[in-house]
Every structure is written in C-alpha cells, then in structure tokens.
Image (cartoon, rainbow, N blue to C red):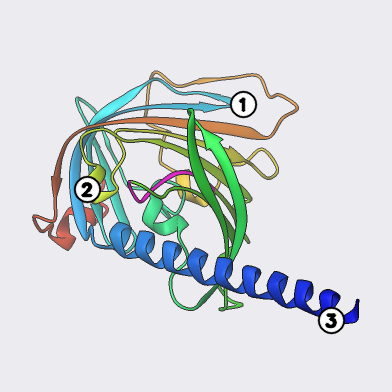
C-alpha cells in the first residue's frame, strides 16, 4: 500500500515537473516571437472610453520602437506621445529577463482551446508583478493577457489576429484597465488638453477604462529614427 502511495506521488510530481517545463518552453517561444519585432508603423483607428472622460475617436499613424518608444501621429490634429506606453503594446506586457513560469491549465477563447501560463519576474524591482497569458499553441499567439503592475493596476488585453500572425502583431486589440483613484494609468497618459472635441463625462463608480485599437497597413522592422519620438512643442 505504501509503495502504491509513493508511486502515485512520484508520478504526480513528474507530471507537474513536465508540465512546468512545457509551459516554460511555450512562454520562451512566444516571447522570442514577440520580441523579434524591433519596430513598426501602422495606420490605426483608436477609441478610448474612460469612465470620467469623453474622447473622440482618434485615427493616425502609430510608431513603435523596441523596447518602449511609441508615438501616435494624428491625422488632421496633434501628435500624441505617451509618457509611458506599457499599456499599449504586447511586448511591454510580457516580462523580460529571468522569470518563473507556472502552467495554469487550459481554457477556450473564441471557440478555440488555449493554454494558460502565469509568469512571475525574478526581478523584484520589475513594474510587472504577474502576467497571465492565454496562448494559442498552434499559431504561437497570445490571444489574451492579464497583467498586474505595481504602478498602473491591472491591464487586460484581448487580441485578434489575421494578416500579421507571423509577427505576433494583432489586427484588433481591446485593452481594459482597472484604474486607481479615477486617474489614467501612466501608460495612457497623453496630452488631451488641446483636443477641442473632448468633453467631460460623468464619473462612475467603476474605475475602469478601455482602449480599442484597429491596426492597418503595418510596416515591420524597417528601421525608425529616435528623432520620431522626440516631444515637440505644439
């Protein structure tokens, strides 16, 4: 009887060990694919819905350069330079460096079976505390992320892919943020003061905001000058 118990416990330990290794390999492969994109430009349409603000739909050209540079050049309006864009790009929601990866089972997203992994950075100073990823193993894509940060609360990202799957770049993204003290997280703090169409919106009880982004016409890894991201006086 004791031998059977020992055998069962051994098999359970081996199973969890194998699952942990598989989860780590899956995460490493996904991270490598995502971080292979060093820069891109894309035409975008962006809708921002914050509980206490009313902001018109934005359209323009979005510039991104790894690891953390981003700029939205609005069509017919001001350029917007996020002061900290952790919430606007998948690559900055995936921890870098040494991490601990935990297999969290499976789920179904949009009718497709996906693998869930939890990723905890080893670096105690990292702004990311925990990232939870829903990964399409067949296409090696993150279709959903849930990231808890030290400064910006929790950020949830739902991603849809079509034309740029090989680069792990989405065609559509919906970002949901649970805000602190009715303030925009630093990742989406932009200069809206000069936007004439913006009107106050009555505050609600739920500290929540969403950003919907539709990407068009990516130009990927073509090289972007750092000068593009310099803040200029408007």
Kindly identify which numbered label has been placed on residue 166.
2
- Secondary structure under tag 3 reads helix
**What residue is at 61 percent from the left and 77 percent from the top?**
124
**How far is the residue under mark 3 from the one under mark 1?**
60 Å
- Lower position in the chain sequence, tag 3 or tag 1: 3
Residue 190, position as x, y percentages in the image? 42, 42
Q: Quadrant of residue 118?
A: bottom right
Residue placed furthest toward the left: 222
**What residue is at 44 percent from the left and 76 percent from the top?**
97
Residue 206, position as x, y percentages in the image? 72, 30
Q: Are marks 1 and 2 in contact (CB under 8 Å)?
A: no
State the quadrant of the C terminus.
top left
| Nearest to the observer: residue 108 or residue 165 | 108
Q: Residues within 10 Å of mark 1 (few under 14, many from 20)?
A: many
- Secondary structure under tag 1 reads loop
Looking at the magenta stretch, what is its main secondary structure?
strand
Which residue lies under the disc numbered 1?
51
């Amino acid at each position: 009887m004791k031998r059977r118990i020992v055998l069962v416990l051994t098999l359970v330990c081996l199973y969890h060990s194998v699952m942990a290794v598989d989860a780590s390999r899956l995460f490493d492969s996904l991270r490598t694919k995502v971080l292979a994109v060093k820069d891109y430009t894309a035409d975008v349409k962006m809708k921002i819905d914050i509980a206490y603000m009313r902001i018109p739909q934005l359209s323009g050209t979005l510039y991104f350069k790894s690891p953390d540079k981003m700029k939205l050049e609005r069509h017919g309006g001001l350029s917007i330079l996020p002061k900290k864009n952790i919430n606007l790009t998948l690559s900055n929601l995936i921890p870098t460096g040494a991490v601990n990866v935990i297999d969290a089972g499976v789920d179904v997203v949009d009718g497709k079976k996906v693998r869930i992994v939890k990723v905890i950075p080893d670096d105690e100073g990292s702004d990311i505390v925990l990232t939870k990823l829903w990964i399409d193993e067949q296409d090696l894509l993150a279709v959903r992320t849930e990231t808890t940060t030290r400064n910006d609360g929790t950020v949830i990202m739902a991603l849809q892919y079509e034309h740029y799957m090989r680069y792990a770049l989405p065609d559509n993204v919906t970002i949901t943020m649970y805000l602190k003290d009715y303030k925009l997280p630093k990742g989406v703090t932009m200069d809206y003061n000069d936007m004439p169409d913006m009107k106050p919106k009555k505050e609600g009880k739920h500290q929540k905001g969403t950003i919907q982004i539709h990407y068009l016409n990516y130009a990927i890894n073509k090289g972007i000058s750092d000068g593009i991201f310099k803040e200029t006086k408007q």
